[in-house]
Amino acid sequence: MKKTLLVSASEQSAKALAQLLRQEGYPSVTTVYAAYSARERSEETAYDLIVINAPLIDENGVALAEHFADTTRASVVVIAPQKNAEELSDLLNSRGVMVIAKPVNKHLFHHYLLFADCFRSRLLRVERENERLRHMVEDLKIIDRAKLLLVTCLNMSEEQAHRYLEKQAMDLRTTRLNVAKQVIQTYEN
């Protein structure tokens, strides 16, 4: 279920935006009325979408949007008065925050939300790939450390150490990583 945090100074605007968000497929809408409350909520719950109806009672919404862009995985949308929208867009777009001018056009809002959802999906895919690559690098470090131990402790060449790890992995029907961890445990103690 898509979770949305809606930040608005006006209760009337918040109700209308919450209804519009629900119609757009965001059934779980949490509404807060100040930036400090929004920051607290975002620490408690991970949101898919954060909508800031600027200006807020305790700030203009820019710092809050930047905070969410830097600290969450949520798509961040700022709804700003027409006179400020272009300036805010120039300021926030580079941070990955979309700015929509008031009054909100339902058709355009629909497309902004689709884009925000696509952008978030792509970001999450990139994060998963980065995490996979990070694990791969960590595994290679462990395997290289085991090879170094085999070279230094058993006077093997680097090629022999490599073949040893591969052969042990095949013989024991396990991964080179598991064999490397066993080698490290054996020769570092």
Image (spheres, grey):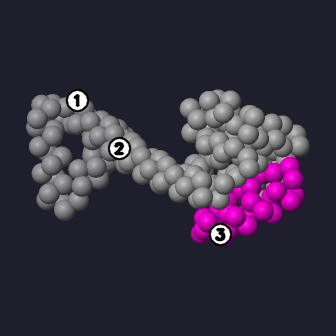
Q: Mark 3 or 1 closer to N-term?
A: 3
In the image, residue 3 sits, relative to residue 122, either above or below, namely below
Separation of residues labelled 3 and 1 (CA atoms): 66 Å
23 drawn magenta: yes
The structure residue drawn at horizontal position 65% and vertical position 42%, both measured from the top left corner, is 99
Instruction: Answer with left or right where residue 6 lies relative to residue 69.
Output: right
Q: Amino acid at mark 1?
A: Thr
Judging from the image, what secondary structure is the residue with disc 3 in? helix
Q: Position of residue 122 (x, y in %)?
A: 44, 50
Image quarter (top left, top right, bottom left or bottom right) of the C terminus: top left
The mark found on residue 133 in the picture is 2
Q: Amino acid at mark 3?
A: Gln
Are dots 2 and 3 in contact, CB under 8 Å? Answer: no
Query: Residue 97 or 175: which is nearer the viewer?
Result: 97
Q: Nearer the viewer, mark 1 or mark 2?
A: 2
Separation of residues labelled 1 and 2 (CA atoms): 28 Å
The structure residue drawn at horizontal position 49% and vertical position 49%, both measured from the top left corner, is 119
Residue 185 shows in the view? no
Q: Amino acid at mark 2?
A: Leu
Mark 3: few, some, or many residues within 10 Å (few <14, many ≥20)? Answer: few
Residue designated by label 3: 23
The structure residue drawn at horizontal position 15% and vertical position 49%, both measured from the top left corner, is 166
Residue designated by label 1: 152
Separation of residues labelled 2 and 3 (CA atoms): 38 Å
Judging from the image, what secondary structure is the residue with disc 1 in? helix
Q: Position of residue 15 (x, y in %)?
A: 81, 63
Q: Position of residue 148 (x, y in %)?
A: 25, 32
Residue 132 shows in the view? yes
Q: Mark 2 or 3 closer to N-term?
A: 3
Read off the magenta span: 1-30
Query: Residue 38 or 132: which is nearer the viewer?
Result: 38
